Structure formats: C-alpha cells, structure tokens
Image (spheres, coloured by chain):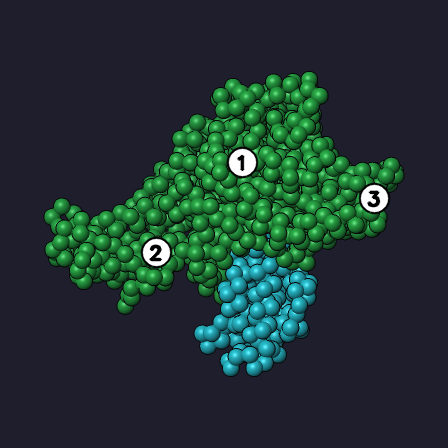
Chain colours: A green, B cyan
Amino acid sequence: MTTTADPTTLEIGKARTRKEDARLITGRTKYTDSITPHGTLHISVVRSPLAHATITGVDKSAAEQAPGVIGVYTAADLGVEAVGLPCAWPITPDQKAPQRPLLAVKTVHFAGEGVAVVVARTVAEARDAADLVEIDYDPLEPVLDMEAAIAPGATLVHPELETNESATWVFDAGAAGTGGSVDEAIAAAEADADSVVVKRRFIQQRLIPAFMEPRSAVCDPSGEQITLWAATQVPHILRTMTTVTLGVPESKLRVIAPDVGGGFGGKIGVLPEEMLTVVLAQKLGKPIKWTETRSESLLAAHHGRDQIQDITITAKKDGTVTGLDVHLLADMGAYLGLVGPGVPILGAFMFNAIYKFPAYKFTCTNVFTTKTLTDAYRGAGRPEATFAVERIMDELAVELGRDPMELRQQNWIKHEEFPFTTVVGLTYDTGNYEQATDQAMETFDYAGLRREQEERRKNNDPVQLGIGISTFTEMCGLAPSRVLGSLAYGAGGWEAASIRMLATGKVEVITGASAHGQGHETAFSQIVADQLGVPFEDVEILHGDTQISPKGLDTYGSRSLVVGGIAIVKAAEKVIAKAKKLAAHLLEASEDDIEFSGGQFTVRGTDKGKAIQELAFAAFMAHDYPEDMEPSLDSDAVFDPENFSYPHGTHLAAIEIDTETGHVDLRKYVCVDDIGTVINPLIVEGQVHGGLAQGIAQALFEEANYDDQGTLVNGTFVDYTLPSAADLPNFDTATVSTPATSNPLGVKGVGEAGTIASTPAIVNGVIDALRHLGVTNVEMPCTSQRVWRAIQDAKGNATQETPIATHSPGAGLGSIDPNNPQGETE
Amino acid sequence: MAQVRVTVDGVNYADDVEPRTLLVHYLREQLGKTGTLVGCDTSNCGACTVHLNGQSVKSCSVLAVQADGAEVTTIEGIARDGKLHPVQEAFNEFHALQCGYCTPGMIMQAIDLLGDNPDPDEHEVREGIEGNLCRCTGYQNIVRAVQGAAQKMKPGATADAPATASVAGGGS
C-alpha cells in the first residue's frame, strides 16, 4: 500500500521527469477537440474578409439548404445583439470600451470578425455551408496607423465613442511621491553641459501567440449543470465571465479545461465562439463543438505587443542616470480584450527595471484600430518595458562612449541595497545582479568576444560580430489583490488549494492554477511530498474542472508556483496542524510535545509516533478522535500574496552578421537567471529554453503584417514564421538563487523570464555588430532584408524595393516586407 | 463514398469515406485515433505526422483513400507489449515536451529520422525535425532526446531495444 518517504531526501530541487508526460507521449491525451459527446453538432463561423465595413445584407438561403445543415444564424437570429463580451480592466474611470459582440451586428471592425454561424452535423458540412453564406458589405475606411488614428479628423473605428483613444493612463513618480519629476530632470539635463538627454523611438511589432493547439470549445447542455470544455488558460474566469456575459447562473455552469496545448497568454480570454457554443447548445439542446482552423486562429485569436515607444533618458556625463520618460501608444485593435487595456500598464512599473532612476514618468494611450484585438502574450507589458530600457541603456552607453555592461553596473541596485524600493514604489525583496552577471560574462567569455569583435572590425571582416546585453528583471506572481484593486482590475490575485488525505494514505491536491504545459502536476507533487513527508508518487494533482477545483484564478503572469504553490503550502500546514492534534490524542501526549518531520508525528523524547498515513486512516475510521475536532485532516487555503516576486537575470548574445547579405546568425546565447528557489531544475530549464525561443522569435522572425486595406497578409504558418528547430541554436542556461523573502518557498517564477529578457539582448547584439558601420537602429524582426537595408542606408546606398518573389516565405526569416506587404512594385 | 482498407496500429479496417477525407480526419473521427493531432491547415506544423508504410507523412496532406492497402502507424501504436518506444522514453527523460501538442508528430518524425540516420549530430537532428513546429520547448531538449534515443537504439545498446530497421518500419 502506501510507503513512507525517506525523510532525508527532499523532493524540492530534484530534476524529476514529469508525471504528465505518460499520457502526452502515448497519445492518450484529451485535448478539447478530441471530446465529442454523442450527438454533437459542429459550428463554423462566417468571418468578414474586410477590416471595416457596413453589413448591408446576409443571404443564408443556400447555406440553409446545404446537406447536414441544422441552421445558420446571425446575432439577430440568436437574439444576442445586445450581448457584449467582457473587459475586466477599466484602466481609467473614463476608459472608452465599445461593445464587443458575439457576431458583428451592423458593422465589422476587423478582418476575421464573425458575422454569422453555421451549425451542421459534421465539421466539413459546417465549413462547406459557411462558404455559401452570402454577405454584402459597404466598405468603410480602415484605421490602421495608431498615430493617424488619434490625429484630428481620423476615421473612427467606433463613431459612437467619438474618438479612437480608449484611455490615457499616467504614472508620474513625482506626483505619486515615489520619486522625482521627470520633466524637471529633463529640463535640468538640457540646461546642464555635464548631462545628456537621449531620445529614441522603438517599435514593438504585432505578434501572434501561436499556441500549437488551436482554440476549441464543446458545450454539452444535457446535464443539470451545462458543461463547457474549452482550450483555455482560465477555466474559473471563463465560468464567471460566461455568467456575466450570458446570464447563465454560475451554479448552472461547469467549465473544464482538459489537456490544453499551450497558451502563452493567447488563451486568456472569453471568446465569442465559446459563448456561441453555449447559446447554441441551449437553443438546440445538443452538444455544440467549435474548433478553429489555424488560419482562423492567426486571424481572429488575440494578438500581442504592438506599441510605439518614445523613450527619453537623461544622465550625467559620468554615466549616472537621472530620469526616464516613457510615452507609449498601444494598439488595442478593434475591441478591448479581457485584460487587453491593462497589458501596457503591467509594463509601467518595469521600465525603470534594475536601475536607480531618481525620476520617472509613464504615459500610455490605448488606441483603437480596425485590426484584431490585442491582449496578453507571454510577458504582457513587461517584455515591452524591458526591451525599451535595455535598448536605451545601450544607446546611452554609445552616447557616452562607455561599455554598455559597465554603464549598467554603475546604475543598477547593488546586492547589499536589497530590499530596495524603486522609483515606482515597488519593493524588490531580493536579487544579486552582480552574481548573475559575473557568472554569465565568464561563461560567455565577454572579454574574449569583445576582442574578437575588435579584430573583425579592424580587418573589415564581411562577417561582423555583435554582443547583445540584457540585464532584466520582471514582476511576477500576479498578484497582490489590493494592488490589483488600486489598478481597478476586475478581480483579485489570490489562488486557492485544497488537500484531501485519502483513507489509504494517498493525497489529492486540488489547485486553482490549471496548467497548459508548464508541469504543475510534477512540481506541485514535489512541494506536497516535502511538506507532508509523503512519497512523490502518492500525490495526485487535480485541476482544470470547476466541479473538482471550484475556486481559482488560473494560470498566467508567472503566478502558478508563486501564488498557487504557496496556497498548497498553506493548505499543507493546516493538514499538519490537524494531524498533530489527532496524533497527540492517539498517542496520549500533549500537542506541544508532538514533533513533525518526514511524514512522522512523534512524541518528543520517545520512540512513540504515527505516520501521516496512519493518521489519515484514523481520521477516516473516526473511531477515536478529539472531541474538539472534526474527523478529517482535509484542508483548504487561499493565498493572497503581499508583494510581487522579482526574478532577474543577465542574458548575453553573440550575433554574427554577414554584412554582404544581412544574414543574422545567433552564434551563442548565455543566460544566468535568478528565479529564487528552484523546485525542479528540469522544468525550469525547459521554461527558459521555450521562453528564449519566443523572445528571440520577436527579435528575428515574427511579425503580423497588415496591408493598407487592413488584411492580415501572413495569416498561415507558411508565412507567419515561427522558428523551427533549424532556426535556433542550443542555449547555455544556468540559475543562481537569492530566495524570495515574500513567500515561504523562496520562489520567484520562471514562465516569462526567457521571453522578457531575450528580445533586447538579440537586437542590441544586431545593432552592436553594425554600429561602427553607421547603423543606429534595425526594426524588429531583424530579418536579413532589414539588416541589409540598414547597412546600405548607413553607407548612403539607394536600395530598390524588393519584389515579393525574392522574399523567402516560410524560411524563418520574416518573409514579408511590412512597408510593402503585397510585394507590389511601384 | 469510396472504400478504404487500411491497417492502423496493427488492426485491419474497411470503411467507406468521402473521397476528400484527409487521412488525419479518418484516423481521428472514424477510428477514434485522437492521439494524432491537427495543428494547422497548411501542412507546416507536423502535429499530424504518422508513418505510412514505414515512412513519416503529414497525415493532413494524405487522403484517406491514398492509404488504401497501406499500413499506418500512429503515436498510439509504437509502444510494444506495454513498453514505451525508446524515443517516447527519451522525450520523457530529456523533458522534450511541455504542452505535448506537437509531441506525437515530433516523436513519429524522430523515429523516421533515426531510421534514416541512426546516429545524427545536432545539426542533422535540427534539419530532420524542421518540418515539425514546437512553441514550448525551444527545441533544445527535443534535439537532446532524439540523440539520447539514438544511443539507446544502437544495436546492442540494451537487450530489449528494437532494431533500428523495424522501428523505422513502424509496422507490427
């Protein structure tokens, strides 16, 4: 039956292979699209090909006559014209938030927006019939450029709002009393011959999260509770928001996130299609399934990033930074997503990063355009902030003629200065930037590569070397509920856990943080094994079903371990307290004399004791237990963090550029991350690798491009170029640890670190390779073509527009020229 | 309707299918072989990779009728007598998967690669799995796993490791 764990071997820190792999490597998985209750009907959404248009007619007759078609419906047919999808983050009291319908009612606001839905017996029949729905449109002017959109006289995406500006959100350290006025800092620097002011504009291109599992939802209305399976990161939020959206009582809804094939923020949301499955299941009394095609996903699932960043930094000529001013324009797309407007605001507290800026101001204007809406994408606000500050630190170093690492060292928070309260008022509890940097520079051979770079420059080598630096931090563990309250977020940031001690000594742990690839089942089992002194194998982690795990706030923002894991620790502490009381009773000892270690409750100074499994059985039998307790060791906990956690790290990239072709080769990548206590080094390494790949992809490969009519031109995996194995090198990753003091495990979170840190490291490296040639900037993604053009521009050579035929679609190096996405020759 | 006779993971099937039915949809929807997944609609991602007569194919780019008379092996058919295939074991051992969605296709492609090249170097593995996209792992551990599996599968590496040829053959 159940064995007791060896108390001398701790699970935390062990490179356990993952429990969840057994089903994933054998095809035994249940992703949403593999769930098909008997009698399921399938839907296909008819989407607008135009970015902005008035709907003048919908002819459903041919579709309705097609084989297998149960019905074709518009919003009016379903009576859902007044239903709007939720936005949970009113960043300002006067934020403009248009109604986001389930299906467009009179006007379509982006290419890909649903206009009608077909229900049929099979997927193929639904899709065939969707092609037969005739919709007439009167085209309207698309709104594509953020600056033009907020200029006077601009075409309005939502005329009833009378503006394309959703909100402007300001954080001024001077006004908040957390730091100095940046306006004064800039004025002082401008008047001071011993100071410099450096201004730069950076572009965060539009990205697509591109999780591998397309989104899917199945709604079965046959039970007392309507069951909604969904490929979602947020089953609990989805349940509550389905109630808010459709009025179905929350107690009548069960949401299940089965195996979910990646999310990266892209599966945080309440989707029109999910709500359509609920509406149609209720209407037709049959299970309804929706699974998107990849092309639909790239077109209509929310996108990420898309900011224009105007950054001003001031510094003394000795290198000491004196102020940072941040002006952002953030493209919301056509509507506000569930947390979309708050994404840039999550960056507001991170632009100052690891540096001791005395003055700081952040201003962000959220703008509507006729594009797919944007929302969370891995890092959500923090990659944008990190990119800008790490790029401007390099620019400042150039301005001052300093080594960029040395300039960072001069300005960062020293390890002996922790805990340190930053210019935005956040208190970084722990960190050691020197340690991570020293180790990274040694592994990287920073000095040796600088020498090689010098050689190559001197020899005018056609292949030039660049060294890219990113010394980043992030705020993780979203989030202290009171902080979210102060930011007007529509929920808290706690997480819930329960532990059930079964009669036979096995342990069921229920968590509200549901994984979609992160390995919670393994990492949480390791934590519980140590907390309760039970074998790793005896712990079962249950999640992702509101009937099993009724309470939770789900998985995003590197919160699962830092918030959800701590909730589990708190529940375990309660189990131990109950078990101690029962042990004292059964052992006829005072509770104060009971000691707990390695799963054993012993009477101090004796060899008398009970294993936790024996106590679980005794509680189950309930033949003999103290009068002032219930016969159960089961416990619940809700943990609300008091602070964020602040992982940090030093990332270094060696970039080789063929100056004759513009080809960028990532020769070497070294990172040393401080993520506090490591629960499972295998999982941590995997998270870092994957994070790096996504951050590097932003720097080198990916961009969602729209043409001048507002059509997404790279809406398939042929031309939205995710990196393949052949596009990436091996990474040299390592961790150091200064445990967090804000939680009992000392953990900080790792899900987003690689993505946040790597993008500026790569771009700094690309520009560093070319700086001596006169190149001052290359926009992301830094494709061969862009790099080559930058070199030619710096040389003063005119370049011809490249026809589309010479691009290399699918080659992993950004095949579309955003200035000429259709490849038209002029 | 067209008739298709096919052996999938060692079981013989005879079915009527619409001529346009893709092999992947036949496997998933008619045979219930939901271990094989669909990740795109342009045959770029490789999530649907299976073996057709011992060669890896993207089952979204093969019609079910083209598999008539053929032997198909999916991710559900590579474990033998309750023992995982060495590539499956290596994916677990080297943490070569996170969300698992690309994994069935990636494993099937890796087995095919090792059939062609039993001892690939890092570059050869990267080139060999280029047609299978993964968004979670950054590929590094997948490369390690494929190379690790190659070591396990070397003739004589372990007593019970299947010979390379029969692995690549994928049949029963």
Measure the C-alpha gap from mark 3 to mark 2: 61 Å
Of badges 1 and 2, the one in the foreground is 1
Of badges 3 and 1, the one in the foreground is 1
Image vertical order of residue A330 relative to residue B172, above or below: above
Q: Nearer the viewer, residue A664 or A44?
A: A664
- Which residue was labeled with disc 1? A413
Image vertical order of residue B106 relative to residue A254, above or below: below
Which label number is shown at residue A59? none
Q: Earlier in the sequence, mark 1 or mark 2?
A: 1
Task: Decide: few, some or many residues near mark 2? Use Cα within 10 Å; few <14, some 14-19, many ≥20.
Answer: many
Whether labels 1 and 2 belong to a single chain: the reply is yes
Left or right: A427 as drawn, with respect to A618: right
**Disc 3 is attached to a residue of which chain?**
A
| Residue at 80% from the left image edge and 50% from the top image edge | A456
**Is residue A604 visible in the rendered structure shown here?**
yes
| Residue at 66% from the left image edge and 34% from the top image edge | A392
Residue type for callout 1: Ile
Measure the C-alpha gap from mark 3 to mark 1: 47 Å
Per the image, label 1 sits on a secondary structure element best described as: loop
Residue type for callout 3: Thr
- Which residue was labeled with disc 3? A802
Q: Position of residue B97 (x, y in %)?
A: 53, 59
| Residue at 66% from the left image edge and 68% from the top image edge | B121
Quarter of the image with the C terminus of chain A is: top right
Q: Nearer the viewer, residue B57 or A203?
A: A203
